[in-house]
């Protein structure tokens, strides 16, 4: 799967508040500097704005930040240059951002088949970027398949597409860590 490059690509997966982002920062601090931090979050409300601010304060000032809510792979390709380390935080919000593009005024998905196509295009573009760039990537995502089956069709589609995205990313990274109570468990 990997070519002879010396860079390694890591996927960090886990539940909410499991320590995924903290571990990504820890790995990046040990990686070649500088770091390009790719933030996929949108500040839709005050709580999210506060979370984004807390994440910003946790990062070194020397790191470059790229805010990219969609078209993440393309945006990284434009910005990465010779940067040796890239963090993408997080795929969960990227998939959510794609879903939001297709919500109608009633809060329902207007085109479920287009959502899947768009999510897979986002992940395909990111994988292409990971495989083409000279940088080592650290990608953060949530594990959403270990809970109850969601009640709504839209929630089930979200879970299914994020699960599919996670599988594709796991296949295209060298190392995969599952975060449990702040502890990284290497699974690949």
Image (spheres, grey):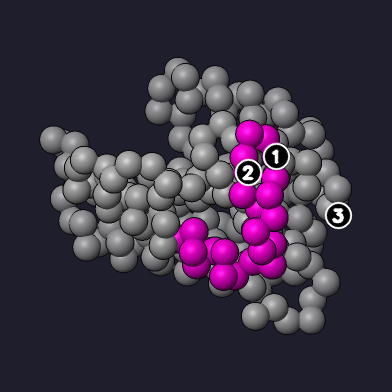
Question: Which of the pair 1/110 is nearer the observer?
Answer: 1
Q: CA distance from mark 1 to mark 2?
A: 5 Å
- Near mark 1 (Cα within 10 A), the count class, few <14, some 14-19 or many ≥20, is few
Answer yes or no: do the residues labelled 1 and 2 have beta carbons within 8 Å? yes
Q: Position of residue 75 (x, y in %)?
A: 56, 57
Mark toward the start of the polypeptide (3 vs 1): 3
Residue 186 quadrant: bottom right
Q: Quickly name the residue at label 3.
A: 32
Select label 3 or label 2 by which is in front. 2
Which residue is rendered at x = 19% and y = 42% of the image? 152
Q: Which residue is mark 1?
A: 183
Rendered residue at 40%/28% (across/down):
44
Q: Is residue 69 magenta?
A: no
Tag 1's secondary structure? strand
- Who's the residue at 41% across and 22% down the image? 45
Cα–Cα gap, marks 3 and 1: 23 Å
In the visual, does 175 lie left or right of 41?
A: right
Per the image, label 3 sits on a secondary structure element best described as loop
Circle 2 residue:
179
**Residue closer to the observer: 148 or 90:** 148
CA separation, marks 3 and 2?
23 Å
Look at discs 3 and 1 and give the one toward the viewer. 1
Q: Report the quarter where the C terminus lies.
A: bottom right
Disc 3 packing (10 Å; few <14; some 14–19; many ≥20): some
Front residue of 148/83: it is 148
Secondary structure of the residue carrying tag 2 is strand
Whether 63 is drawn above or below 75: the answer is above
Which of the marked residues, 3 or 2, is nearer the chain's N terminus? 3
Which residue occupies the extreme left position in the image?
A: 106
Which segment did they paint magenta?
Answer: 165-188
């Amino acid at each position: 799967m990997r070519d002879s490059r010396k860079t390694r690509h890591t996927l960090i997966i886990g539940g909410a508040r499991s320590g995924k982002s903290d571990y990504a920062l820890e790995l990046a601090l040990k990686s070649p500097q500088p770091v390009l931090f790719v933030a996929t979050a949108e500040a839709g409300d005050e709580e999210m704005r506060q979370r984004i601010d807390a994440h910003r304060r946790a990062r070194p000032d020397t790191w470059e930040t790229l805010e990219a809510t969609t078209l993440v792979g393309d945006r990284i390709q434009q910005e990465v240059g010779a940067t040796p380390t890239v963090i993408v935080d997080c795929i969960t919000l990227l998939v959510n951002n794609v879903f939001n593009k297709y919500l109608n005024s009633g809060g329902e998905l207007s085109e479920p088949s287009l959502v899947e196509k768009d999510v897979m295009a986002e992940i395909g573009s990111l994988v292409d970027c990971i495989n083409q760039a000279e940088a080592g990537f650290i990608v953060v995502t949530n594990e959403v398949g270990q809970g109850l089956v969601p009640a709504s069709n839209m929630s089930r589609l979200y879970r299914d597409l994020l699960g599919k995205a996670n599988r594709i990313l796991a296949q295209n990274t060298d190392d995969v860590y599952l975060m449990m109570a702040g502890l990284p468990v290497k699974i690949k």
